[in-house]
Amino acid sequence: MSQEDRKISLETAIEWTTQWRDDESDYNKYNECNAFLIPVQDLNDVLREMGNPPDSSDACVRAYLGVDPSTNTEKLIIVGTEKDESGVYRDLLPTVLNSAEGNTNSIWDFVKPCPPQCDDKSALN
């Protein structure tokens, strides 16, 4: 993963989301994950990659749950989407499986799980 822009490769995103689905049924029995802290600057980068859709637009991003098996850390993997002619929002994915760079589309991993990045005074926590 590029630490500067936090992009990950399609191969890593596939690994992490597969790991989440494999662990999900028993995962929260052993690990607590209530939320994710998302830096606004990085979310703006996703929107910029989508051409900065106007506020009135029906543009969307999609978030996938994943687990980095090397650290057993929860991940929220975010991709831009594009609405096709049938009304389905299609993921804007890189064209190269094992690279986070050199593509017009990116997959973003820039979140920090809660806990430990929690608001200890929030009613949602």
Image (cartoon, rainbow, N blue to C red):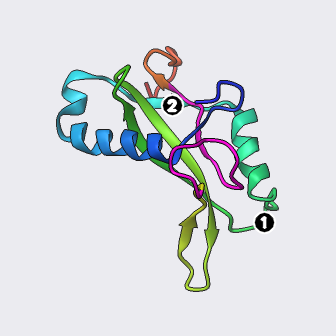
Give the residue displayed 74% in from the left and 58% down from the top. 50
Residue position marked by numbered label 1 in the rendering: 56
Residue 1 location, quadrant: top right
How packed is label 2: few (under 14 Cα within 10 Å), some, or many (20 or more)? Answer: some
Q: Main secondary structure of the magenta part?
A: loop
Coordinates of residue 13 in the picture (x, y in percent):
46, 43
Q: Secondary structure at mark 1?
A: loop
How packed is label 1: few (under 14 Cα within 10 Å), some, or many (20 or more)? Answer: few
Residue position marked by numbered label 2 in the rendering: 36
Along the line of sight, the residue nearer the viewer: 10 or 116: 10
Residue 52 vertical placement versus 59 (above, below):
above
Residues drawn in magenta: 95-112
Residue 13 vertical placement versus 3 (above, below):
below
Q: Which of pointers 1 and 2 lies earlier in the amino acid sequence?
A: 2
Coordinates of residue 100 in the picture (x, y in percent):
61, 41
Q: Are marks 1 and 2 in contact (CB under 8 Å)?
A: no
The span from disc 1 to disc 2 (Cα, nearest Å) is 26 Å
